[in-house]
Amino acid sequence: MATTVGEVMTRRLVTVEGDQPVSAAAALMRDHDTGAIIVNDNGRILGIVTDRDITVRVVADGRGPDTPVREACSRAVEAVGPDTGIDQAARLMRSHAVRRLPVVEDGRVIGVVSLGDLALESDPTSALAGISAAAATR
């Protein structure tokens, strides 16, 4: 059984620069079948943007698809290192009410650990693990 987020994280990163339009982020989400993308600012993490962020912070406010991603993303991002224990990651997710944590090493994002990743590892028979496993095979 894995003990660190580095063992269970998703290494396939999808990123977008903060000055790109949200339409570019939405297209990346579609093309890579993901609901969240790391937002960069010259190679450093600026935040994370989710499909919900685009819906709530852009569309619902009547803003257009040319809105810069930096105006839609969440900037207060909790991040962990690859050696962070999976139990600690789960506690961070719970205390900050987030579903994903960027995994950072030497100031660079090297992966993302999601609630689904933790569920698959800790209880592969749970409903969340089943949903996460099904989504990963689509």
Image: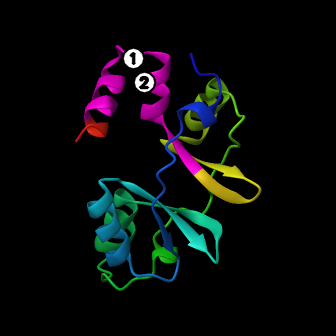
- Which image quadrant: the N terminus? top right
Check disc 1 and give the amino acid type. Answer: Pro
Q: How many marks?
A: 2
Q: Disc 2 on helix, strand or loop?
A: helix
- Which image quadrant: the C terminus? top left
Give the residue pinned by disc 1. 124
Query: Where residue 56 sits in the image (x, y, percent)?
Result: 35, 64
Which residue appears at 29% of the width and 79% of the height? 62
Residue nearer the viewer, 129 or 110: 110
Query: Where residue 79 sits in the image (x, y, percent)?
Result: 66, 48
77 is higher (above) or lower (below) than 18? above
Give the residue pinned by disc 2. 120
Which residue appears at 63% of the width and 56% of the height? 109
Residue nearer the viewer, 41 or 11: 11
99 is higher (above) or lower (below) than 39? above
Query: Where residue 107 sits in the image (x, y, percent)?
Result: 74, 59
**Which quadrant holds residue 126?**
top left
**How far is the residue under mark 1 from the one under mark 2?**
5 Å
Do we see residue 120 in this rendering? yes
Which residue appears at 25% of the width and 32% of the height? 134
Which residue appears at 31% of the width and 81% of the height? 65
Label 1: how many Cα within 10 Å (few below 14, some 14–19, many 20+) = some
Which secondary structure dominates the residues rendered in magenta? Answer: helix
Q: Disc 1 on helix, strand or loop?
A: loop
- List the single residue furthest toward the right: 106
Asked if marks 1 and 2 touch (Cβ < 8 Å), the reply is yes
Question: The magenta stretch spans which residues?
Answer: 111-134
